Image (tube, grey):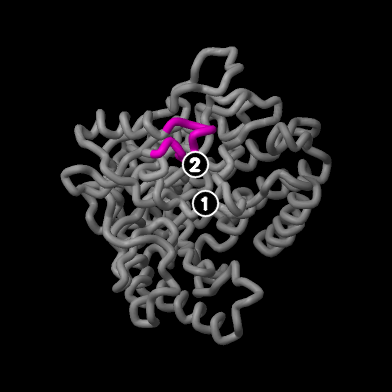
Amino acid sequence: MSSPSTSRYYKDNWPRNADNNLEWDGKDLWILHAKGLSPFRNDWDLSLLICEVEENLKTSIVDIPYIGKGSNSYGFHLKTAEGRDLIGRLSCGDVNVPNFDGFPFDMQCQDVQFEVDAYSLLQSKPAVLASHLLYHRLPVLHPEPRTKHPADIQGRRLLLFEKSPGKTNVWDELNDVQQHHLLTQAASMRAALFNLQLPDNFTAKWLLSRLFEQKPKKLPNPAFTRDFTLELVRSKIEATIKNIGDMIGWEDDHEVVGPVAYAAKQSLLRLLPYIVPRLKNLEEEEAIYRLVLDHGDWGIHNMTITPAGDITSVFDWDVGSITPALLSDPLMAILVDLVTDGNGAPTIIRTHPTHTEAEQKYFQKCSEHYFKVLFAKAPSYHHAIILGKDLRHLWFALRDWRGENPEGYFGELGIWAEEKYRMFSV
């Protein structure tokens, strides 16, 4: 194992080939391990992972055809002696490495627990095709002082799944008909997820803790009402922009609430009752204020897809959340993001400079097809997006702030709020 470093540690570096210093391709891990040449041998012991899998799944691993790197986890394809194909997900960062500076331990545990609950909930909902979870383990934090590189892998969270047919990110391998077939399935599953009636114990357990930062300390009991949504957004504004001189954002940013951001908060709070829609009857109110489960990163990078364009599973629910239908995000990621504009019309964002005009027109048609299917199967989704236009603008502005320039960012949002307030008050 590598020696402790005084530098801050976030996660392991991806291995490089010894002969040409290029990134390792993730293949032949089983062979390299048998020779004592695992590319990870300086960071963690692959034998410990194999033993844990074999012990908990009562099987024998006979091959690891491929390992890839995600944002925060390694993804393994494992083969067993009885012919089963498994997918393993192991953290790239170990919470017990000295000077660990990755996602906080409590947050990592919560992400795993939420994901486990989401898989458990969705296993009885075949219309969504959530991956089949076989085993999981939370990271274990060793007592301080943590001065040596850990000899075990207990500080890395681990999840094991049944491997579904297909692979991710296959968009360029499909023809136009297959791509539209894929989008039809993704939209149908997204509609099924939106229409899913969540158990009360699930929403009560996870609503507050899965809110994006900054979070209020408490919320009233979840309810499918305008009053609850108003209080949710009000609490979120108050938690994000406190009082003048208070810390804003994250500690490492060293920012405090200034007069412009504080004035913007007052403008947002004054506007808020005007942009939380009032409905004619309780049935209509429940349709747009009911609580729904959002995946949080819906797209082909988190789906297994066959060569024919069939989706076989959706995974990585660890960034999911619970939100009123009015504030649900319908984004679908392909090579660009398929989204709706403020009026609920299909459009695209996150295009690349290399995309030609013809390609962008094709992506626009993809967006139109995706949302046509989604809104046909979940008409209240479209209704909620249109009704919640201004509230959604505010909510996603709070979500998308990354901690920089709070005076400028919230100053602009405050100007928007004042303009809207004048329109509504007239």
- In this orientation, which residue lies closer to the viewer: 152 or 207? 152
- Tell whether 14 sits left or right of 83: right
Quadrant of the rendered image containing residue 255: top right
- Dot 1, how many residues are within 10 Å of its Cα: few (below 14), some (14-19), or many (20+)? some
Name the residue beneath numbered marker 2. Answer: 39
Disc ID at residue 7: none
Q: Is residue 11 above or below residue 411?
A: above
- Dot 2, how many residues are within 10 Å of its Cα: few (below 14), some (14-19), or many (20+)? some
Q: Main secondary structure of the magenta part?
A: loop
Disc ID at residue 24: 1
- Tell whether 167 sits left or right of 400: left
Which quarter of the figure is the C terminus placed in? bottom right
Mark 2 and mark 1 in contact? Answer it, CB < 8 Å: yes
The residue depicted at 35 percent of the width and 65 percent of the height is 186
| Disc 1, SS | loop
Span of residues in magenta: 35-45
